[in-house]
Each structure stands twice: as structure tokens, then as C-alpha cells.
Image: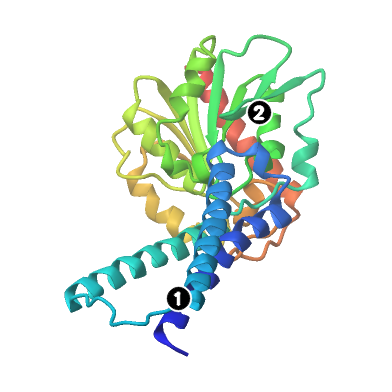
């Protein structure tokens, strides 16, 4: 196989990967994609279109090479110019391979049926979906205390419903954010737009699951004049918040394999002295939402519903404290 053939083969493989990645995401989690932030759908489209373009140009190049005749001596190019062209082409192809890998990796963990059931509006809670979030709005009265919540990385925003809906049933406005590409840290200031949309709420807490909690802690630190509380679900703060004027609750699982009990213990020094720590015995990382098992997580020793009842109770305790002022 010549060097030219090898190069064209690599282009074909990368082009196929760029097409396969979004196809795999749509086949395995396609129902979740329309309900995430629009950047995810855009990424899938960019990957697929780039793959088509790469395969098309590769096919045209192969045909041109097959038909080309070179009866006379070919123009010479300097070694430096050839090396530069080869390097640029190699870097470009490597970046496209990274795009394909990132597209596959960003596949959301889809919400289970239990979470989807909790998304239905009823006489107690109205569930609203917008481009940037889901809102759980109590029907009985205008909520004056609210929570803006960021899901864990790559977790379908709808998967948070079973844990967040009971907070709305208790009278609190809850907004679950759709993070760009499913990663809350890509837009750490996103909570501000949700807060502005519900200007009837007088006191706010922010929070999140796993990496979503990290993003929420960053927002709370930067907006301590607007945020009264911080809710960490299997998470920890980004930086030192020990001196912050915040009401904080850290809720974790004793069997969590991703945010381990050691991680939570290490976060104590970075949180205010009055932080309420709740360790749910037997709970794992994936119990803080409903999206099935997660690679690297621990093995639970309690039922999901039992663990989530404790998670909800600890979360309500924080919101009650925030509401009391």
C-alpha cells in the first residue's frame, strides 16, 4: 500500500466515524436529544455533514488520482513545502477524529420511564419546557423561593424530574437547566437567565448533581448577593466557599463510585461551617437522577425510591431554611 493510498484510507475511516458517531447517538438516545440544549443537536449535524464532506472529497480525490496521467516530468516542490502540507493535513484529520470521538462521548444518559412520568403536569405542578430549561411550577400559589438546578455531565435533563418534582409539590419553584452539550460548566452563568425569567421569586438557591453542582457552586460564589442557598447532590464546590454567606446542603451516597465519600469529606474544608451534610446509606451516584446505571459507579444496597426519598427530604430542608430567610 502506497503512502497516498494509506492517507486516503485514513480519510475514509475518519469520515465514516464522523457519520457513525451521531448515528449511534440518535439510535441509542435519540428520544433525549430534542429535549437537551440545542448545541447537542447542532454538534450531531456538524459531525454528520463534516463526515459527508470528507467522504465526498476523498472519493473525488481518488477518482482524480485514478484518471490522472503524467506524461512529462512533474513540477517539483520543496521538501519544506511538502512537509508543511502533510503536517497541516495530518493535524486537520486528527482534529476531525477528535470531533467524532467527542460527538460519541457527549451522548446523553437518557431519562428512564420513572423520570418521564414525573414530567407530566397535574393539579399540583405545571411542568414547562423551554429552550433553556424545564420549570416545575407549583399551581397552588405563587412561589417566592426557587431553586435553579444543573444536571450532571451528559445526564438527560429530564432524568432529574423524579427528584425535583417533589420540591415543587412542596411549594418551591424549580428550574432544571439544559446545559450546552450537556456540560453545565460550559455555561456557568446560565442560572442568571432562569432567575431573571421568574422575577416573582424573592429568594433563590442554586444546586446541581455532580459536575452540575460544581458549576452551581461557581455561580453561587460569583452571585452571593442574589443567591441564598447552595444544594450539592453528590458534588463539591469549585474553590473555597468556607467564608461565603450561604446556606449549604451536601447530599451524597455512601456507595457512590464517582463522587466518593472521600471526595465529599475532602470538600468540608471548602464549605461554610454550618453546612448540612447528609450521607444516604447505600445510595450511588446515579440515584440522584433517573437515567439507569452509570459506568464507574458503585453498587447500591438500597432501593432507588428509598434513597431518593432521603435525597428529597434533605433538599427540602435546605429550601425550607432558605425560605425562612
Residue 246 % position (x, y):
39, 29
Badge 1, how many Cα within 10 Å: few under 14, some, many 20+? few
Closest to the observer, 15 or 122: 15
Residue displayed at 46% across by 28% down? 191
Q: CA distance from mark 2 to mark 1?
A: 70 Å
Q: Position of residue 264 (x, y in %)?
A: 45, 53
Give the answer, above or below, for where 256 lies relative to 314: below
Mark 2, mark 1: which one is toward the viewer? Answer: 1
Q: Along the polypeptide, which appears first: circle 2 or circle 1?
A: 1
> Is 104 or 100 nearer to us in this picture?
100
Q: Residue at x 59, y 43 (%)?
A: 41
Q: Residues within 10 Å of mark 2 (few under 14, many from 20)?
A: many
Quarter holding residue 217? top left
Could you tell whether 136 is left or right of 116 in the image? left
Q: Position of residue 98 (x, y in %)?
A: 45, 63
**Secondary structure at numbered mark 2:** helix
The residue wearing badge 2 is 167
| Residue 312 x %, y % | 65, 37
Amino acid at each position: 500500500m502506497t503512502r497516498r493510498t494509506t492517507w486516503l484510507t485514513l480519510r475514509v475511516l475518519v469520515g465514516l466515524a464522523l457519520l457513525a458517531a451521531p448515528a449511534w447517538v440518535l439510535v441509542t438516545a435519540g428520544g433525549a436529544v430534542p429535549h437537551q440544549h440545542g448545541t447537542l443537536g447542532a454538534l450531531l449535524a456538524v459531525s454528520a455533514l463534516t463526515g459527508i464532506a470528507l467522504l465526498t472529497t476523498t472519493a473525488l480525490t481518488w477518482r482524480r488520482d485514478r484518471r490522472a496521467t503524467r506524461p512529462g516530468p512533474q513540477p517539483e516542490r520543496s521538501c519544506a513545502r511538502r512537509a508543511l502540507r502533510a503536517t497541516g493535513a495530518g493535524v486537520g484529520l486528527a482534529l476531525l477524529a477528535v470531533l467524532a470521538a467527542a460527538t460519541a462521548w457527549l451522548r446523553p444518559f437518557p431519562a428512564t420511564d420513572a423520570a418521564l412520568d414525573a414530567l407530566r403536569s397535574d393539579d399540583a405542578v405545571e411542568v414547562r419546557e423551554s429552550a433553556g430549561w424545564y420549570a416545575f411550577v407549583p399551581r397552588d400559589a405563587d412561589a417566592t423561593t426557587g431553586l435553579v438546578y444543573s444536571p450532571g455531565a451528559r445526564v438527560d435533563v429530564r432524568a432529574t424530574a423524579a427528584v425535583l418534582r417533589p420540591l415543587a409539590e412542596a411549594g418551591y419553584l424549580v428550574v432544571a437547566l439544559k446545559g450546552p452539550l450537556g456540560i453545565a460548566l460550559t455555561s456557568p452563568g446560565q442560572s442568571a437567565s432562569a432567575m431573571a425569567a421568574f422575577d416573582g421569586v424573592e429568594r433563590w438557591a442554586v444546586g446541581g448533581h455532580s459536575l452540575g453542582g460544581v458549576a452551581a457552586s461557581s455561580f453561587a460564589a460569583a452571585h452571593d448577593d442574589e443567591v441564598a442557598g447552595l444544594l450539592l447532590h453528590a458534588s463539591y464546590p469549585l474553590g473555597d466557599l468556607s467564608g461565603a454567606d450561604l446556606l449549604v446542603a451536601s447530599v451524597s451516597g455512601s456507595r457512590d463510585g464517582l463522587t466518593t465519600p472521600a471526595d465529599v469529606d475532602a470538600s468540608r474544608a471548602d464549605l461554610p461551617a454550618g453546612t448540612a451534610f447528609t450521607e444516604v446509606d447505600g445510595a450511588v451516584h446515579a440515584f440522584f437522577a433517573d437515567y439507569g446505571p452509570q459506568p464507574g459507579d458503585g453498587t447500591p444496597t438500597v432501593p432507588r425510591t428509598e434513597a431518593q426519598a432521603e435525597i428529597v427530604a434533605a433538599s427540602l430542608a435546605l429550601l425550607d431554611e432558605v425560605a425562612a430567610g
